[in-house]
Image (spheres, helix red, strand yellow):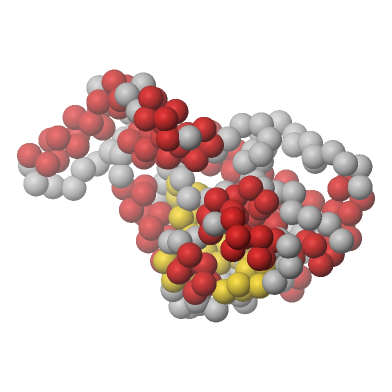
Amino acid sequence: MSEKVIVEASEHILTITFNRPEKMNALDPESFYLLAQALYRLQHDDDLRVGVIQAAGKHFTAGLELEKWAPIFAKGTVPELPPEHLDPYGINGEMLTKPLIMAVQGICYTSGLELLLNTDMRVATADARFAQLEVKRGIYPCGGGTVRLPEEIGWARAQRYLLTGDEFTGQQAFDWGMITELADASDVQNRARELAKKVAAAAPLGVKAALKSSKTARLHGDTAALNGVFNDMPGVMKSEDAMEGVRSFMERREAQFKGR
């Protein structure tokens, strides 16, 4: 039996690949925990600087494999994560502080869309199909979609899709600012990795601080983010990477950052 989730590390990048194309990469509980375990590894492995989530086959994901999740949701409690697992939806427990990039082709429904909304850069095909279609299944989004989709595309537009379960395309999502860039299906994963390489080549401490400030603004407002900008500045400015950045500029070469 092939692995449901393939996890590979190289060039400071952790690549997580959903690998159930015969099931349209539907996320069953086992796949969820494998994803959560991989994200914990990304967070705590100092050699890893950025993550990429992608999927094998024609489709990113059809969403949750509902028949396997229904008994869990019926309990009315959030699935408990074991130690050394990190919530992919950024709702419970430890939050990911390293950048996460997602590559989407085909359909990306329900949990897939909510996963995307908790990433930092998103590459998709123009004809990718997104939907928060839980209301058509007698339930409603519980992975952050009700909060993050309005933030991303505006209140009225988000309710148009949250309350009907209708689809929208990758092109629409790009036009609304929800997608970083569009790519052909044959190139969408390559483009995501190219972006990941750019992030991995940048100074890790600077990247982490920039992402932290951005997330603070999103979660707690602009004032909180602005008040905290200089809290992390001394540590970054005194780092070996900051000195390497100056040296590389003076020597007109590419910087070689170590994350310290």
Looking at the picture, tell me which residue is in the foreground, 142 or 151: 151
Q: Is residue 124 left or right of residue 202?
A: right
Q: Residue 134's quadrant in the figure?
A: bottom right
Does the rendering let one see residue 120? yes
Q: Residue at x 66, y 53 (%)?
A: 145
Q: Residue 66's quadrant in the figure?
A: bottom right
Does the rendering let one see residue 8? no
Q: Is residue 127 above or below residue 221?
A: below
Looking at the picture, tell me which residue is in the foreground, 37 or 225: 225
Q: Is residue 228 above or below residue 31?
A: above
Picture coordinates of residue 165, whole percent (x, y) = 73, 67
Picture coordinates of residue 106, whole percent (x, y) = 61, 75
Classify the position of the N terminus by image quarter.
bottom right
Q: Is residue 183 above or below residue 140?
A: below
Picture coordinates of residue 126, whole percent (x, y) = 50, 76
Q: Is residue 35 above or below residue 106?
A: above
Looking at the picture, tell me which residue is in the foreground, 38 or 60: 60
Picture coordinates of residue 114, whole percent (x, y) = 64, 54
Q: Residue at x 55, y 51 (%)?
A: 151
Q: How many marks?
A: 0
Q: Residue at x 38, y 25 (%)?
A: 227
